[in-house]
Each structure stands twice: as structure tokens, then as C-alpha cells.
């Protein structure tokens, strides 16, 4: 697997932009971006491929996903290296993504027949009137994924969609496009027909609307503000969408909580994946009587979590926007060990 071989799978002919490695600040690779014509091409190929893919027996589609599961495990170390280089996350956090995708692929491949089977519903006059509920593919599903979980969010929702007979066009974040292309490469090795899983690239405000305007259904993960725009655009087209948006989650430490135990939960809940997690704790409310012992334990455990950005230990690096240089290139110590995406 080389960068060039993965970029070959990208549908993009527009201007290139540099992708920066968070660990070093060096250029990792040069990423071509997709034009509107490229997005048209991606959807044309996806629609052509979807017809044949959905006509395949369900057992055959499931077999592809089981082979993908096996290939992912066999090649996981290459995937871990790639995810870390693109995101700067600790290896243990990257490993969680690999395992999540493996579990998802195996679960849906094994349970698809039950989930997709026809269901019979009784009508107003049982025995005389009834309805059979059939599940049919949407067509081409657009997936718009962020950078904080480049494997999970590019493929985990797409797996059941593909098993159900849909084709996928995914637009990952520009920082993590290579991770999505690695997934596309493994799917091809597993026997997925060409065009069923296609990757386009580019900035969200530019390429995102092009993807939405051509999709039959949209999966979006990102901010609440952008989620409202996605919902509005999908509503105008009368197509469905599913979204996972940001949150402001709170932790409450009661007076009867053990400070060390509560602090360990707070560190994991706040700073896992460098804090780049939609369900991360962003506020902590502490009973006044527990404030000082909790604060001391929290600060001490946080300091011990990492003394420096490393590839395999601790919390991991911040993912920095080097174009704006808005944040320091280091793991913060004590007070804030991550950012919120």
C-alpha cells in the first residue's frame, strides 16, 4: 500500500492541497480535490454499479463484508499507522476505530437476513386485509464524514447501507481522505464491485452541497450549525437524512462520590481521542464539599496521562489547522488536553 496507489482510487481532478502530519508539522501528502464534474462522475458510476449490486443475492453481499472484516484485521497495523499520521491520535484510540469497524461489518453481515426480511402486518380485518412491508434500497447514499474518527465515520454507517443494496459516495474531511481510500482499497480486495463505494475530496462547504444534491439519502456527522444546513437542503429535495451532531455534555460529581474514581472517569470522558469526541464531557459540576479533592485528583491524573505527544501512549496530539496556526502544536498539560470539533 502506497499513498499513490490509494490516491488512484480518488475521483478528483481539481487543485491539490497539502495535508499536514500533526506529529511533525511536515507535509504528509498532496491531495487532489474534486470538482463538480468529478462529483457528477462519482454519482454516475455509483448509480450504474448500484443496480447490479442490489440485484446480487443478499448472501453474496454479506460475504463481501465478511471478507472485508477479515482483511481489515489482517492489515490493521497499516491502518493504525495511517490513521495516526493523519489525525495525530494515540494508537489505542486508533485501534478502537479498527475494532469498531470490524464489529460493525461482522454484525450486519451475520444479521442482515433477519433485519431485511419482509414483515407482515395485519389490517383492519385480520385474515382478509394485510400488508407486507418490504425493504428496498434508497439508491446512492452520500456520506459526509469528519476527521476525528476517519475509519468509523467513513464506513460504519455505509456498511449496513451497502448490505441493503445501496451504493455509497463518501466525502471525508480533507485531513483524513487517505484513511477513507484505504477502506475503499480493502473493500475492492474483498470483492466489492467497482463504483459501489466511491470517494470524493474537498472542503465541506464546497463539495458537501454537491454530494447532497445528487444523493438519494444523506448521512452527515459534524456540527449542529452545519447539520441544520444539511437538513434544510435535504428537506428541499424531499430526501431523508441521518445526522450525528455535536453536544455539550456535562458530568456531575455528587458529594458522595470518591474523588479518585470520579477524576479517572472525568479524564477518560473529557480527553479520550484528544477530546475530539462528540460525546466528550465539556462541563463538570462538582459538589462544593468535593471540589478541592476532586480538582487535585483530576489535575494529577491529567498530568500523568501524557507528558508529550507520542504515537502510542497518552492522549495524543492536537489536530492543528496549520493554515491558520490558531492552536499550539503540543498536547496541553493539566488544564486542557484537547479541542472540541
Image (spheres, grey):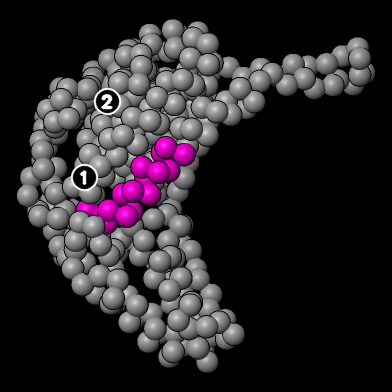
State the image quarter where residue 92 is shown: bottom left
Circle 1 crowding by C-alpha within 10 Å: few under 14, some 14–19, many from 20: some
Count all numbered tags in the image, as a single digit.
2
Label for residue 185? 2
Q: What's the residue at 28%, 77% (across, down)?
A: 303
Report x, y in % for residue 198.
31, 22
Report x, y in % for residue 219.
44, 34
Q: What's drawn in magenta, residue-wise?
A: 88-103
Q: What's the residue at 61%, 22% (across, down)?
A: 113
Please say if 38 is above or below 97: above
Q: Is residue 249 visible?
A: yes
Can you say which quadrant of the picture contains the C terminus?
bottom left
Q: Is residue 292 left or right of residue 124?
A: left
- Tell me the element at label 1: helix
Is 105 one of the magenta-colored residues? no
What residue is disc 1 on?
81
- Most distant residue in the left direction: 26
Circle 2 crowding by C-alpha within 10 Å: few under 14, some 14–19, many from 20: some
Q: Are the residues at dot 1 and dot 2 in contact (C-beta closer than 8 Å)?
A: no
Label 1, label 2: how many angstroms apart (C-alpha)?
Answer: 16 Å
State the image quarter where residue 319 is shown: bottom left
State the image quarter where residue 24 is shown: bottom left
Type of secondary structure dominating the magenta stretch: helix
Q: Which of the two labelled residues, at mark 1 and mark 2, occupies the earlier sequence position?
A: 1
Report x, y in % for residue 339.
30, 62
- Tell me the element at label 2: helix
Can you say which quadrant of the picture contains the N terminus?
top left
Label for residue 140? none
Q: Nearer the viewer, residue 88 or 19?
A: 88
Q: Nearer the viewer, residue 127 or 64?
A: 64
Amino acid at each position: 500500500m502506497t499513498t499513490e496507489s490509494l490516491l488512484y482510487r480518488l475521483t478528483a481532478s481539481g487543485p491539490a492541497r497539502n495535508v499536514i502530519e500533526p506529529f511533525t508539522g511536515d507535509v504528509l501528502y498532496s491531495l487532489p480535490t474534486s470538482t463538480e464534474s468529478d462529483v457528477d462522475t462519482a454519482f454516475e458510476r455509483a448509480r450504474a454499479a448500484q443496480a447490479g449490486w442490489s440485484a446480487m443475492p443478499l448472501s453474496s453481499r454479506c460475504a463481501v463484508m465478511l471478507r472485508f472484516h477479515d482483511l481489515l484485521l489482517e492489515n490493521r497495523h497499516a491502518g493504525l499507522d495511517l490513521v495516526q499520521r493523519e489525525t495525530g491520535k494515540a494508537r489505542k484510540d486508533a485501534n478502537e476505530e479498527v475494532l469498531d469497524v470490524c464489529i460493525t461489518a461482522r454484525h450486519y453481515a451475520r444479521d442482515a437476513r433477519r433485519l431485511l426480511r419482509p414483515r407482515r402486518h395485519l389490517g383492519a380485518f385480520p385474515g382478509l386485509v394485510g400488508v407486507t412491508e418490504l425493504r428496498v434500497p434508497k439508491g446512492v447514499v452520500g456520506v459526509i464524514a469528519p476527521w476525528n474518527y476517519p475509519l468509523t465515520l467513513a464506513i460504519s454507517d455505509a456498511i449496513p447501507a451497502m448490505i441493503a443494496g445501496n451504493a455509497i459516495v463518501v466525502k471525508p474531511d480533507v485531513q483524513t481522505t487517505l484513511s477513507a481510500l484505504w477502506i475503499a482499497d480493502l473493500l475492492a480486495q474483498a470483492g466489492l464491485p467497482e463504483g459501489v463505494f466511491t470517494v470524493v475530496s474537498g472542503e465541506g462547504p464546497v463539495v458537501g452541497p454537491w454530494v447532497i444534491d445528487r444523493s438519494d439519502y444523506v448521512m452527515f456527522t459534524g456540527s449542529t450549525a452545519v447539520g441544520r444546513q444539511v437538513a434544510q437542503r435535504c428537506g428541499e429535495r424531499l430526501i431523508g437524512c441521518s445526522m450525528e451532531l455535536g453536544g455539550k455534555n456535562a458530568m456531575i460529581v455528587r458529594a458522595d462520590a470518591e474523588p479518585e474514581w470520579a477524576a479517572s472517569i472525568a479524564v477518560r470522558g473529557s480527553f479520550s481521542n484528544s477530546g475530539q469526541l462528540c460525546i466528550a464531557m465539556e462541563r463538570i459540576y462538582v459538589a462544593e464539599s468535593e471540589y478541592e479533592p476532586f480538582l487535585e485528583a483530576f489535575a494529577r491524573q491529567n498530568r500523568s496521562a501524557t507528558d508529550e505527544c507520542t504515537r502510542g501512549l497518552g492522549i495524543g496530539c492536537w489536530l492543528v489547522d496549520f493554515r491558520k496556526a490558531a492552536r499550539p502544536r503540543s498536547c496541553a498539560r493539566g488544564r486542557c488536553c484537547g479541542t472540541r470539533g
